[in-house]
């Protein structure tokens, strides 16, 4: 199933629970029966801000609209809580986790630490990722031409996840795996097609090439520049968004 819900920061508004469930139903169809589909549906709505940060999600209403029992939705909420996308509060239910500057900065600090280890390990193994990266680069160009931000961000994160997998270290993969949903949401909130950096895949290819020839120091230098640029762009956009909200109040 295709769950492309693209909502830019400028265009999006805070949705009521009724609007949230209608949005999901419009994309997914009248009935969702499988637990994985429920999880993917709600996760995608959160990642793309069809469910805005800070929004309360009423489980009973959402389950009724999706045509499922509360059991698969409850299981989905547990997974989303573990991924850091929602908080579960007594007497309030599920809350879409707000985006805050310190939390995003901390997230990217952890990401950089884990990916630095992954890149050094992959370079020590002379892992050849260049051919696969060039294929993904072509797919990203096609996604950009059709203004498909969802796929662009997925391909971007998949590239970094592939480096982790190439280390052969399951602990690196699992540690980074716990953060991809939060990273994707931050990218969806603060990048639009117009704001998405055009040189991303040039940087990806250069990084893959450095790993392939075993130049760990160069690979780490390229990675640091790449991730810090993304972090700084996201934090700058968050500051702009907070100013915009303050002006309109």
Image (cartoon, helix red, strand yellow):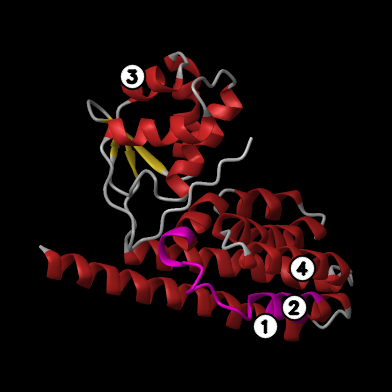
Q: Earlier in the sequence, mark 1 or mark 2?
A: 2
In the image, which disc is placed on residue 138? 4
Does residue 94 appear in the picture of this structure? no
Disc 1, SS: helix
- Is disc 2 in contact with disc 4, using a CB cutoff of under 8 Å? no
Give the magenta-colored segment's residue range. Answer: 188-208
Q: Earlier in the sequence, mark 1 or mark 3?
A: 3
Which quadrant would the N terminus be assigned to in this image? top right
Q: Earlier in the sequence, mark 4 or mark 1?
A: 4
Q: Earlier in the sequence, mark 3 or mark 2?
A: 3
Does residue 177 appear in the picture of this structure? yes
Q: Nearer the viewer, mark 3 or mark 4?
A: 4
Q: Earlier in the sequence, mark 2 or mark 4?
A: 4
Disc 2, SS: helix
Within 10 Å of disc 3 (Cα), the crowding (few <14, some 14-19, many 20+) is few
- Is disc 1 in contact with disc 2, using a CB cutoff of under 8 Å? yes
Q: Earlier in the sequence, mark 3 or mark 4?
A: 3
Q: CA distance from mark 3 to mark 4?
A: 43 Å
Magenta run includes residue 201: yes
Within 10 Å of disc 4 (Cα), the crowding (few <14, some 14-19, many 20+) is few
- Is disc 3 in contact with disc 2, using a CB cutoff of under 8 Å? no
Q: Which residue is mark 2?
A: 207
Q: Residue furthest left?
A: 249
Q: Which residue is mark 3?
A: 60
Residue drawn at x 82%, y 65% as measured from the top left: 135
Residue drawn at x 46%, y 67% as measured from the top left: 191
Q: Nearer the viewer, mark 4 or mark 1?
A: 4
In the image, which disc is placed on residue 222? 1
| Left or right position of 211 against 12 | right
Query: In the depicted view, which residue is nearer to us: 109 or 55?
Result: 55
Q: CA distance from mark 1 to mark 2?
A: 6 Å
Q: Residue furthest top?
A: 69
């Amino acid at each position: 199933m295709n769950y492309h819900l693209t909502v830019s920061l400028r265009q999006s508004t805070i949705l009521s629970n009724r609007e949230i469930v209608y949005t999901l139903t419009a994309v997914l169809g009248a009935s969702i029966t499988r637990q994985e589909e429920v999880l993917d549906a709600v996760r995608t709505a959160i990642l793309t801000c069809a469910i805005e940060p800070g929004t309360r999600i009423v489980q009973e209403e959402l389950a009724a609209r999706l045509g499922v029992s509360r059991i698969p939705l409850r299981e989905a909420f547990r997974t989303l809580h573990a991924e850091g996308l929602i908080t579960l509060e007594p007497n309030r239910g599920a809350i879409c986790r707000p985006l805050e500057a310190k939390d995003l900065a901390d997230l990217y600090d952890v990401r950089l630490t884990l990916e630095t280890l992954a890149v050094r390990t992959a370079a020590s193994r002379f892992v050849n990722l260049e051919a696969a990266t060039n294929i993904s680069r072509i797919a990203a160009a096609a996604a950009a031409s059709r203004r498909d931000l969802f796929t662009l961000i997925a391909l971007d994160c998949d590239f970094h996840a592939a480096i982790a997998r190439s280390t052969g270290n399951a602990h690196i993969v699992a540690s980074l795996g716990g953060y991809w949903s939060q990273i994707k949401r931050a990218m969806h909130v603060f990048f639009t097609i117009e704001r998405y950096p055009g040189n991303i895949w040039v940087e990806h290819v250069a990084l893959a090439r450095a790993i392939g020839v075993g130049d760990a120091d160069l690979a780490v230098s390229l990675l640091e520049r790449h991730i810090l640029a993304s972090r700084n762009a996201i934090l700058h956009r968050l500051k702009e968004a907070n100013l915009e909200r303050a002006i309109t109040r």
